[in-house]
Amino acid sequence: LVAFVLFLFFLVLPLGQALNAYTQLQTGLGALQRIEEVLDLPSETAGDSPAPAGPERDGEPAVVLENVSFGYPGGTEVLRDVSFTVPAGSRIALVGPSGAGKSTVLALIERFYEPTAGTIRVDGTDIRQLPRDALRRRLGYVEQEAPVLAGTLRDNLLLTAPGAGEQRLLAALEQVNLGALATRTPEGLDVQVGEGGVLLSGGERQRLAIARTLLADAPILLLDEPTSNLDARNEASLREAIAAASFRRTLIVVAHRLSTVVDSDLIVVLEAGRVVAVGPHEQLLETSPLYRELATHQLLVS
Ligand code: ATP
């Protein structure tokens, strides 16, 4: 289809315009691919066998990083010898100064990139041994600037739960405090959210992404909390959405809020790509000067 469309472009447009259109088409296709990845839609990339996720292994930690190092292609090393264990059902916060590598850790667990050294296990299995589809069924990922598709609320929710009924979609919205979006206009779930979700606030967009992830029902959730200051209502709603998301799930959150961190079972403190401390809040206040500094000055207080 792409080849046919390109053929038509070159046939009817002058060369300059055709090249311009080609560039836009490429950009659009790239964005589409990225959205598909982020929304955990099953990939059909060659080599990805559609094998089932395999049995969960009782007693295995949900996620283990063992001596993981990584640098982005062409860049310097951004993670060095990172190791930590996430027990199944626990809530873990990653904290550290900007650029410490927190989001990169999530990207590696999602297998957007391969570590240059070390191993990552999900439910006891090296993720290199898991087909991508199987890995994505285990992991839900909500990024900071969660993409929202032009279309309706329903379109956005059905992306991760095709065929889900009205009640299930409404329940997911309620869990993230977005129920009002579906009731305040006669269109209900068919209300438009605008190009890229422009009719929603930043906080609402991220909560919609959390609702999508809840519908996908992956047992392990990776969440990159927004850095921006939210107003008090959005802040409280985000906190409730995160609490709903962590119910009966394992949650690994890149945390920018003190409240998120304090509620976590374990906090991993990263500095310049290395783990410098691991522990619960009270303990780290005593033992980690960097954590004390972050908790008192850098983490948003609300
Ligand atoms: P923040 O709190 O500001 O989001 P972070 O701790 O999450 O920061 P990362 O986003 O993981 O940090 O970035 C770690 C390092 O990797 C930074 O130096 C960053 O500039 C670099 N980096 C991040 N993403 C990429 C990328 N896609 N390509 C190249 N370098 C990147």
Image (tube, grey):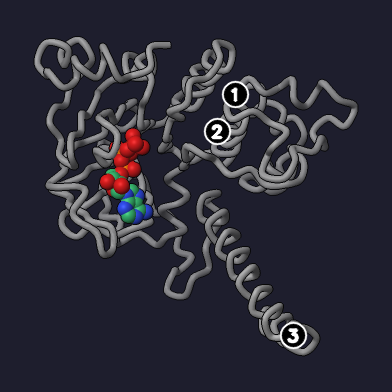
> Disc 2 residue type?
Ile
Q: Are marks 1 and 2 in contact (CB under 8 Å)?
A: yes
On screen, residue 193 above or below 28: above
Res 289 quadrant in image? top left
Location of the C terminus by quadrant is top left
On screen, residue 98 above or below 117: above
Dot label at residue 14 = 3
Would you name the residue on which mark 1 appears? 176
On screen, residue 45 above or below 70: below
Res 94 quadrant in image? top left
> Disc 3 residue type?
Pro
Q: Is mark 3 within 8 Å of ligand 1?
A: no
Indicate left or right for 86 with 239 as reference. Answer: left
Q: How many marks?
A: 3
From the top left corner, tell me how far across and down residue 5 is, in percent: 73, 80
Which quadrant of the picture is home to ligand 1? top left
From the top left corner, tell me how far across and down residue 159 is, in percent: 65, 48
Would you name the residue on which mark 2 appears? 210
